[in-house]
Image (cartoon, rainbow, N blue to C red):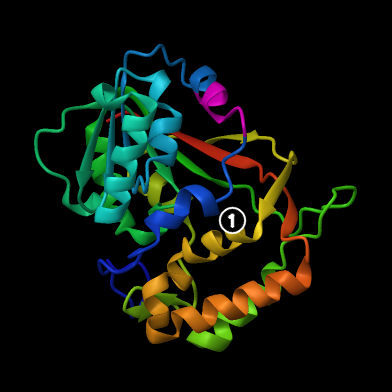
Amino acid sequence: MEVAAGWEWDDTLFSGTAAHYRRGRLPYAPGLADVLGGVLDLDGRGRLIDLGCGPGTIALGLVGLFGEVVGVDPDAGMIDAAAREAEERGVTGKVRWIRARAEELPAGLGSFTVATLAQSFHWMDRESVAATVRGLLRPGGALVHISDVKTPTRTVAGLPYPATPYAAIEELVRRCLGPVRRAGQGVLPRGTPGGEAAVLSAAGFAGPYRHVVPGGQPLERTTDDVVAGVFSMSFSAPHLFGARLGAFEKDLRDLLREASPSGRFSERQPGTEVFVWPRGPE
């Protein structure tokens, strides 16, 4: 099943974005590991598989809760970035990185206590992946779906710098790449699909049990951080601009300079939403 009608995954979806992730993406809410550790009663001895792991953001953020962590992603740049980060953190002995789609996992991975999907499920053949994940989980295990809490605005009132001009950035991307969202070699005229709950329920998972890790903490971002954030997104990945990349970046930096001559922006930390789906009975 395709992620959306008329679109098929290809390996350029996140091409070139990994180098911008650590600097450009806003973090998950502080306390996420503590919440999951408590909710799932983790004792540092289980196994985690993180599907669509990117540069290891969640896998490495939760590494202290497990005896072994396996991160899976189809993008070579993401896997390389995750491996470098693991080495920097001194945890290479506890992690394993696999370059593969979640739909094409290698045999012999064993069973897992927890599987995580952090803002990645919508890129997958969800019915197939849900069934595969349920088969990988031990009795009593759970799938955890993680995403930012979707709030219309996060006010920066009282913070020292202007808000990041996201609407103007999105308009600049549209002017350069066209009005329809780009995704790898294709487009997503209706965006990515929702309805994860129906897919996971149909696969036999129980629940879900929702938990919110609160955000709202003030963050300070530089122009370089915001530029990296733009280039970390699939719909504005560097390769999509081709020969126009330099011109786009100049226009982007001009826009940001006009919005904040100091080169600094204020943000509020997004909250993090966690849905825990127990494996459920056979």
Query: Relative to the observer, which residue lies in front, 66 or 273?
Result: 66
Quarter holding residue 261: bottom right
Which image quadrant: the C terminus?
top left
Looking at the image, residue 5 lies above or below residue 27: below
* Amino acid at dot 1: Asp
- x then y, percent, for residue 28: 57, 40
- Determine whether, in the image, residue 52 is placed left or right of residue 96: right
Residue located 72% across and 62% down the image: 164
The residue range painted magenta reads 30-36
- x then y, percent, for residue 259: 77, 70
Residue located 48% across and 47% down the image: 22
Residue located 40% across and 55% down the image: 19
- Determine whether, in the image, residue 155 is placed left or right of residue 175: right
Q: Which secondary structure, mark 1? A: helix
Q: Tell me, yes or no, if residue 179 can be seen here.
A: no
Query: Relative to the observer, which residue lies in front, 211 or 255?
Result: 255
Query: Relative to the observer, which residue lies in front, 2 or 44?
Result: 44
Q: Which residue is mark 1?
A: 225
Looking at the image, residue 249 lies above or below residue 69: below
- Determine whether, in the image, residue 8 is placed left or right of residue 196: left
Asked if the stretch drawn in magenta spans residue 124, the answer is: no
